[in-house]
Image (spheres, rainbow, N blue to C red):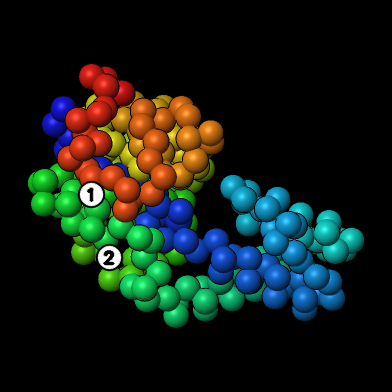
């Protein structure tokens, strides 16, 4: 199996920015006069920014107009960007840098496939941008995973057939998006959640790219 393109999701695969989303939502709740717990925050995972805000307002028993919601969502995002702007290389997840280096050494192209509009800022802060041949982020796509747009665009721009691509994802929706794009999929995290992937690994520091490619089936 000769792969030509490895596409990585960002959050949960290369870095963990979930804590900064939580800090920003918690700060917004405090400003609105109520406590927003980690248990409450679980309800926001995989949910859009505006829906997340609506859940937060439900927790606080508050109602806001559409204009007020837009202002609150913008404030939350401003705080989130403020937090991630202070990130550094120490926040790269274990094994992620070495894994990217191995993929590069194998002569395989690397792309990012993330819905985050802040993906480039995060990669810059972590000094990882140079590893990527192309970056697909929330400024280039309009459809969220499990729609395959984010992965298909990367393959299209880099002129690689889908069946020669492998996607690394930590979310079930991302695995589904990779499968729908006609690509091989590697789940990074729980095998219970990511069981639809071709292969599941606990984290990038517990696998090598070369050994993974040997385990992939004949076809995606």
Residue 15 horizontal/vertical position (percent) = 41, 61
Q: Residue at x 28, y 36 (%)?
A: 166
Question: How many other residues sit within 10 Å of disc 2, few (<14), some (14-19) or many (≥20)?
Answer: some
**Is 4 on the left-hand or right-hand side of 24?**
left
Q: Residue at x 77, y 76 (%)?
A: 30
**Is 35 on the left-hand or right-hand side of 76?**
right
**Residue most extreme to the top:** 218
Residue 198 horizontal/vertical position (percent) = 36, 28
Q: Residue at x 63, y 65 (%)?
A: 22
Residue 211 visible somewhere in the drawing:
yes
Residue 146 horizontal/vertical position (percent) = 50, 35
219 and 61: which is toward the camera: 219
Q: Residue at x 27, y 22 (%)?
A: 217
Residue 2 location, quadrant: top left
Q: Answer yes or no: do the residues labelled 1 and 2 have beta carbons within 8 Å?
A: no
- Look at the numbered disc 1 and give the secondary structure of its residue: strand
According to the picture, the residue beneath numbered tag 2 turns out to be: 128
According to the picture, the residue beneath numbered tag 1 turns out to be: 110
* Quadrant occupied by the C terminus: top left
**Residue most extreme to the front:** 206
21 and 213: which is toward the camera: 213
């Amino acid at each position: 199996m000769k792969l030509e393109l490895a596409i990585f999701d960002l959050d949960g695969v290369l870095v963990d920015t979930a804590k900064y989303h939580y800090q920003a939502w918690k700060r917004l709740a405090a400003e609105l006069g109520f406590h927003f717990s980690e248990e409450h925050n679980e309800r926001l995972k995989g949910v859009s920014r505006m829906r997340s805000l609506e859940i937060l307002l439900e927790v606080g028993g508050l109602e806001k107009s559409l204009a007020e919601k837009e202002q609150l969502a913008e404030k939350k995002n401003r705080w989130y960007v403020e937090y991630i702007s202070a990130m550094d290389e120490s926040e790269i997840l274990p094994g992620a840098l070495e894994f990217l280096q191995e993929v590069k050494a194998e002569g395989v192209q690397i792309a990012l496939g993330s819905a985050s509009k802040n993906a480039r800022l995060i990669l810059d802060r972590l000094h990882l941008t140079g590893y990527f041949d192309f970056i697909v982020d929330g400024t280039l796509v309009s459809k969220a995973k499990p729609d395959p747009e984010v992965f298909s665009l990367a393959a299209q721009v880099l002129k690689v057939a889908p069946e020669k691509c492998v996607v690394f994802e930590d979310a079930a929706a991302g695995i589904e998006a990779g499968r729908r794009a006609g690509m091989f999929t590697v789940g990074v995290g729980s095998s219970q959640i990511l069981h639809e992937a071709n292969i599941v690994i606990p984290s990038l520091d517990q696998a090598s790219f070369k050994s993974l490619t040997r385990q992939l089936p004949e076809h995606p």
